[in-house]
Amino acid sequence: MTNIESTIAALMSLPGDTSSFKSSVIYDIGRQNGMTYNQIKKEFLDDSNKVGRGAYSLRTAASSSASKVELIQTVTPQQPIASLMNEDVFIPTNDSTFVQWGEYKSVRKIIDSRMFFPLYISGMSGNGKTMMVEQACAKAKREYIRVQISPETDEDDLIGGFRLVNGETVFHKGPVIKAMEKGCILLIDELDRGSNKIMCLQGILEGKPVLIKKIGQVVSPAPGFNVIATANTKGRGSEDGRYSAANIIDEAFIERFVATIDQPYPSSSVEHTIVSKHMEALEVDDTEFCDKLIAWSGVIRKTYEAEGVDELISTRRLCHIVKAHSIFKDRMKSIMMCIARFDDDTRSAFLDLYTKIDADKQVAPLLTASEPSEPSEPYPF
């Protein structure tokens, strides 16, 4: 099927009167189907096709090609368009390790209000932004759907597109449309990782009905629908280079969020409670280790602020260390495994800081690629 034929098919599938179309509609559908402005003007917007002010007859434009006429006759406004929709919307499960802190109560109030109140939550990685929204929905027993943004995310991923199912072309509704129809919370995770392709969400962020241009269907948001986005930056990129994949978000786009929350790392007392809950859930009986981990992360963050180190230990990484400890039952091994991703200097600095807090523990020499470890005992099989 050519671009022209695809455009005709899409136009003729729009609901309502198809005897004529506004030039703006023809232009939008044509561009979606790969036509250039000059092609659209030549094929559809010629004066001979004009039937009124800004209105053009599609049948006249298509009469030059028998295949186009046949296409118009077979694609009628009454022809149903199948739609594929799976169950991505659900109420999150309550997490026993979750601790309410920071702006949790504000997020919960917004969710409980069932108002359309787009919210932007920024903060450093691993400080519980996404989990806070998820658990607020769980406590409120609100359905939600989470969308992970990447540089490749586009309108087809978010709004929907055609898929081939059992030999039949079926329109697959994207998560945004599903959330609108369900009246649930749409959680857009890592918003600042997206490209300008996410600009298709601008109308969504105004809380207004959206036209699914590919099938000509208008979807109005059900009561309770709301958008909450999380990101590591405030939409202006990462000046220090920590989040190199973070993009600058268009001002017109980010302006549509009603409010912004900037979430820091939790206080030492809150973080202690979080780590303790993870230890309890993983059956790790080592309260002294918990105390030392909190003191260690606090020292590292102060050193980071004083520009003494270039990296941080997040709350999430502390929980990773607890999980490693539940397996290996060894404090230093758990720490070393969970900070191995850092460069040698940073890793050495972190380990040195920990040994000052936990004086009984000694740091084994750091291994390099040229100094392989001794092989462990083989398994008996």
Image (spheres, rainbow, N blue to C red):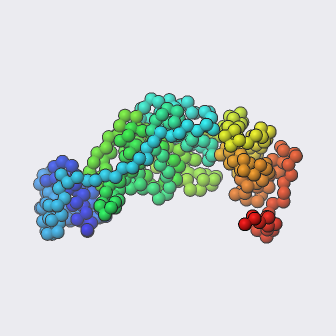
* Pick the front one: 29 or 365: 365
> In this rendering, does residue 368 appear at all?
no
Q: Which quadrant would residue 67 be assigned to in this image?
A: bottom left
Where residue 340 sits: x, y (%)? Answer: 72, 57
Q: Does 93 appear above or below 75?
A: above
* Pick the front one: 372 or 370: 372
Left or right: 97 in relation to 55 = right
> In this rendering, does residue 364 appear at all?
yes
Where residue 333 sits: x, y (%)? Answer: 78, 53
Where residue 92 sits: x, y (%)? Answer: 51, 40
Name the residue at the front extreme. Answer: 381
Where residue 264 sits: x, y (%)? Answer: 63, 39
Residue drawn where x is 63% and y is 53% of the image:
242
Q: Which quadrant would residue 290 be assigned to in this image?
A: top right
Residue drawn where x is 40% and y is 34% of the image:
224
Residue drawn where x is 18% and y is 51% of the image:
78
Left or right: 257 in relation to 28 = right
Residue drawn where x is 29% and y is 61% of the image:
168
Which quadrant holds the N terminus?
Answer: bottom left
* Pick the front one: 188 or 199: 188
Left or right: 196 in relation to 215 = right
